Image: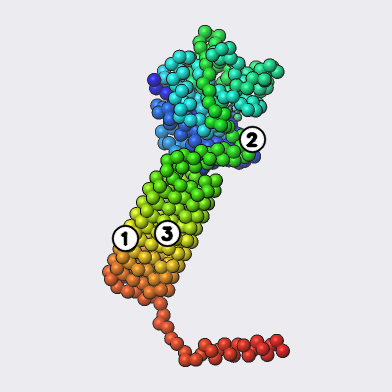
Amino acid sequence: MSIAVVILAAGKGTRMQSDLPKVLHEIASAPMLVHAMRSAAYLNPDHVIVVAGHGAEQVERAAKDYDPDVKVVLQTEQLGTGHAVAQAKSALDGFQGDVVVLYGDTPFIGEDTLLRMKEERAKSDLVILGFDAKDPGRYGRLVTSGDALEKIVEFKDASPEERAITLCNSGVMAAAAPNLFRWIESIENKNASEEYYLTDCVEIARNEGKSASVVRCDEEETLGVNSRVQLSEAEYYFQTKARTELMETGVTLHAPETVVLAFDTIIGRDVVIEPNVVFGPDVTVETGARLRAFSHLEGCHVSRGSVVGPYARLRPGAELAENTRVGNFVEIKNAQIGEGSKINHLSYIGDAEIGKASNIGAGTITCNYDGVFKHKTRIGDDVFVGSNTMLVAPVALGDRAMTGSGSVITEDVPTGDLALGRSKQVNKKGLGAKLMDLLRAKKAKQSK
Ligand code: UD1
Ligand code: CA
């Protein structure tokens, strides 16, 4: 059975108090919408359609950034969830498979849950994902009789008896496309909100003699974000789950609650992560590496056996080969560091290539930016860069080359050469002590 997923993301999200469309607020370094798109991907769908409205251009950009194949349709006026799904109809013209509706602000619907819904669809024309709410609040209530779902009542329209029901609507639903779009045509907006409720499909389907049923999941999975407080709760939920999953797959976290992961962080077995390590998007860390405390990583790759930090920063394009060392207060951006090379203290390495077993002395900086253009630094194998060397790019150091401490290197250094790019030292006989005596005498005179 082919599947189309429709993700509703047109709402304004007034309670976020934000200029950014709600679904673009981030959880674990990815917009909420991307999390919903990842859930959609569990179903291996033939079509993914995002219904955008508020901030549609921004929403479209974010959606296509993540998946260029996604279709974005516009809902110019937000007349309700039923009206929103109707906007996807022409994009799915002639599609005979199943439609699964997800919400852009409900980011954690899991694979197992979606697969259970798919299974249930074989038995039932309309499947709703429900959950038992600890505090049912303003959720739509699922009115059931036995296993069958009779209708969904929105909180605003519910009687006191219906409000007492704790089985609630998550918003996720599945039905055959021709059925769903036919039902949607009969939805009216005669309700407390004067909106076209998608949830009315249940009664409409039942009146046609079709079957409707409920699949249940944990409340946390259906966690919806309507405010900044809920956004922080969603972040907390994601982080807790992701850290646990890492530990279960063989990663050591010394203080899990202090480690911040991204939605796509990949960490190999037997990696040790010390406290307060922060991951931005797109980080891969291989088996047996160690990430020491207070390091910040994004867009980078750390190979087997490497040690990063404490207090290191790996920025996009940092590629560390096996057994490298990147120590405290070192920043690396867009640079390949060869096997066994060491950059242990206080350095900036940007737009560079470093070979194997080279040692970059403390305080070394690749001067990669001239104010307009970026330039490359190339360092060979077994190179020894003296402390506090300024490598003014474009510049290259051959294999086994050396630079003297404090050098400003503006020209290439051939293989095996020593480059001294600093002025020659002169010693003035006795002048140090003499100068100090003079200064002390001056101070004594002033304080009289
Ligand atoms: C909806 C459900 C409710 C359920 C709850 C779960 C309806 C009528 N009610 O209520 O039963 O318990 O979700 O969170 O469906 N959207 C659009 N266009 C619109 C309206 C909404 O794209 O015209 C999008 C929103 O951006 C959001 C989602 O649909 O992502 C849900 O809309 P929202 O207004 O938050 O629905 P609720 O009132 O929470
Ligand atoms: Ca909502």
Gap in angstroms between the C-alphas marked 3 and 1: 14 Å
Query: Which secondary structure lies at badge 2?
Result: helix
On the picture, is 311 further left or further right than 395?
right
Dot 3: few (<14), some (14–19), or many (≥20) neighbours within 10 Å?
many
- Of the image marks 2 and 3, the number of the one nearer the N terminus: 2
Amino acid residing under circle 1: Lys
Mark 3: secondary structure: strand
Quadrant (top left, top right, bottom left, bottom right) of the C terminus: bottom right
C-alpha span from label 2 to label 1: 55 Å
Question: Which residue has dot 2 on it?
Answer: 14
The circle drawn on residue 326 is: 3
Q: Nearer the viewer, residue 29 or 161?
A: 161
Gap in angstroms between the C-alphas marked 2 and 3: 45 Å
- Depth check, front residue: 164 or 58: 164
Query: Which residue in the structure is indicated by mark 1?
Result: 356
180 sits left or right of 416 in the view? right
Q: Is residue 65 visible?
A: no
Residue 265 vertical position relative to residue 325 in the rendered view, above or below: above
Does mark 2 have its CB less than 8 Å from ligand 1?
Answer: no
Residue type, numbered disc 3: Val
Residue occupying the point 43% across, 53% down: 290
Q: Position of residue 314 (x, y in %)?
A: 45, 54
Is residue 430 something that shows in the picture?
Answer: yes
Residue plotted at (63% across, 18% down): 153
For marks 3 and 1, the one nearer the N-term is 3
